[in-house]
Amino acid sequence: MLIIDFETRSQCDLKKKGSSNYCLDPSTDILCMAALCTDTESKWLWYPDEELPQALRYAIENADLVCAHNAEFDMGIYQIAVTDYGFPQIPKQKWYCSSAQCRVNAIPAGLDDAAWALGLKTRKYSKGAHLIKKLSMPRPDGTFLEDEELLIDMGDYCMQDVIVTTAVVRATRPMTQMEHQDWLKTVEVNQRGVLIDYDLATSALDYSDTEQSAIAIKLIDITDGVVTRHSQSARIRDWLVARLGDDHAIIKLMEVYKEGVKKLSLDKNIRRNILNMIENSEIIVDDDVRDVVQLLDDGNKSSVAKFKRMLEMCDEEDHRVRGAFVFAGASQTLRYTSRGLQLHNMRRDCWSADEAEHIAHLMAQGEPLEGDVMETLSKLLRPAIIPAQGNIFVVGDWSSIEARVLPWLSDSDGGDAKLQIFKEGKDVYIEAAKAMGLGESSRQIGKVAELALGYQGGVNAFNSMARNYGLSMSDAEAQGVVDKWRSTNAWAVRFWAELEQAAKDAISFPTKKFHAGMVTYLFAPDMMEGTLLCLMEGDTIIQYPKAKLEMVATKFGDRVQITALKASLKPKADAKQWLRTSIYGGLLAENCTQAFAAAILRNALRQLDDVVASVHDEIVLEVGYDESPTVLKNLQQLMEETPSWAEGLPLTAEPVIMRRYGK
DNA sequence: TGCGGCGGCGCC
DNA sequence: AAAGGGCGCCGCCGCA
């Protein structure tokens, strides 16, 4: 393996425009490249004013794998080395990403974070950020600082990055061949990109700026200038407290507890409660207070800022946003994540293609939008993603895949009975309600129970999910549902316990395998100071690094629990160790369910061309209009075909054709 | 001015 | 014997 790292400079703002635009920008150039061959330990530091050393050329040409941390960036920069500096081409399949390797090992994706979490002595040089600011970013006049000494420092820094990368690669397991292929597939999807309706996004951004200003003016007026934007949550909170006093009913409604600490929040749910109670005259307040809460509600239609991001991130020429997907970005479950333009949390409730085009037309004419403008714009987000001229989207999602995977993994009679409901095409939510003795009319309760309770969630999980479906229950009522669901789904309760026991046994008896349903745990004592491996069919592996059994103080007293390092919890800057978390049965159940569903997604993606996006249980293909009927049929067949390693798991999907992303 | 922490949003 | 958790981005705010 040849491990490389580039330092570069550019007038392009990497963070704002994304690495694809950065690499293609004409002002982007290489400052230096460091390389290390893991076979020979040979190291090179190359500057663009030098010839490419013969030995380095040889190492590049003969490497089995060329590895970089976040290799998609280095792949793009490497093209500059090929074009401008005569470097040899590297075949796509040879590229390898050490950040992806970190993620499949469930350690942080960032290079220094990974070294920190692993407890390595080899760490990145802290002067890097300073050097990048000096040498990589343009000065106000657009030119770059040329400084021999700093450039030498930059070379040191670059070489140290390669050394740290090497240490991290050696301290963790390599990606399996399949993981590597799946990573390469992600690169392919990222390079294809998704097309943005540029004119629509531009208009939407324009209208949202105008509307937010209008909201701001009203807020300034009501609060005498204390609050100048709807997003100033702290100022709005303080203004309300000053106006109403600590004991006012509205302030009481705002109380939330975070890790035992009382805070005042005005999030969507709380705003709705407040506005409802005012509406029903359960609370009497003056109009100013109501208006402020209402204006906050109007302005906080999420993610209208995404239009701005779309325009920044897309390629200037073809208007495609590239590099949106991260293979195994969620390191607990190896699900994909999305970055830059976050395609994984676009508002689902949106306009149809016809409606979107009507609104686009109105905006293009400069007509005012009627009704709740921010709401209208927010419902345009998904439809702003479109197929290219002559193309169309084919979109498929699996029907309640997690609700099927969980019972399948449990490998139990009760789980089989649950799967049978799916196999017979019955409504699983009605069946759940019936089983709980609630009658068919209680489908909503059955649905919330099925969605919220499978992973050991209790009253809080049930009620917060219930709110999303307009269901209101007291804690006592909710507890009743929880109890009934657990007694009618004893297989799930048993599975949580089995998973926890198997995981604990695995840690107690290293290198021995312990099973819970279709899930196997194995503790590898030599891997990252002890890693709990969770093994499933389909070559699916998830990891719990530095797992151990330890006494943990809980509100029920001291208990022996599994704890492990948690990649996504970044410690504060002055902390010595990476953060850990407790692990319990319900969490294990959730992790392996999501991980297995993600494996089914990757299995399908592997067999598909023309993928432009995926969202956990959904696949988006962009294909020529004429071939779409065939593609539609094939996609359904592929998605409904259970992989050989998941026999007995019923999968259904009904892909549809879309002129715009959305409905 | 830059950065980390925090509150907030939304999806699966 | 209790437990939703997996994500990423935006904007504000206080601090260095």
Image (cartoon, coloured by chain):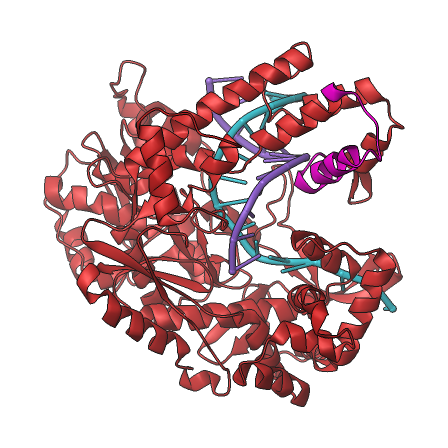
Chain colours: A red, B purple, C cyan
Q: Position of residue A263 (x, y in %)?
A: 78, 35
Q: Position of residue A436 (x, y in %)?
A: 77, 76
Question: Relative to A501, is A146 above or below?
Answer: above
Question: Relative to A367, is A484 above or below?
Answer: below
Which residue is rendered at x = 52% and y = 47% of the image?
A: A113
Which residue is rendered at x = 35% and y = 76% of the image?
A: A638
Residue placed most toward the observer, A323 or A524: A323
Q: Name the quadrant of the C terminus of chain A.
A: bottom left
Q: Name the quadrant of the N terminus of chain A.
A: bottom left
Which residue in the rendered view is the most extreme toward the top? Answer: A224
Count of numbered tags: 0
Give the main secondary structure of the magenta stretch: helix
Which residue is rendered at x = 18% and y = 52% of the image?
A: A56
Residue placed most toward the observer, A383 or A110: A383
In magenta, the rendered stretch is A266-288
- In reply to whether residue A494 is colored magenta, the answer given is no
Q: Position of residue A141 (x, y in %)?
A: 27, 13
Q: Is residue A503 visible?
A: no
Residue placed most toward the observer, A472 or A596: A472
Left or right: A364 in relation to A570:
left
Determine which quarter of the picture holds residue A564.
bottom right
Determine which quarter of the picture holds residue A83.
top left
- In reply to whether residue A285 is colored magenta, the answer given is yes
Q: Is residue A257 visible?
A: yes
Residue placed most toward the observer, A359 or A336: A359
Left or right: A561 in relation to A517:
right
Determine which quarter of the picture holds residue A278.
top right
Question: Relative to A416, is A261 above or below?
Answer: above
Question: Relative to A137, is A579 above or below?
Answer: below
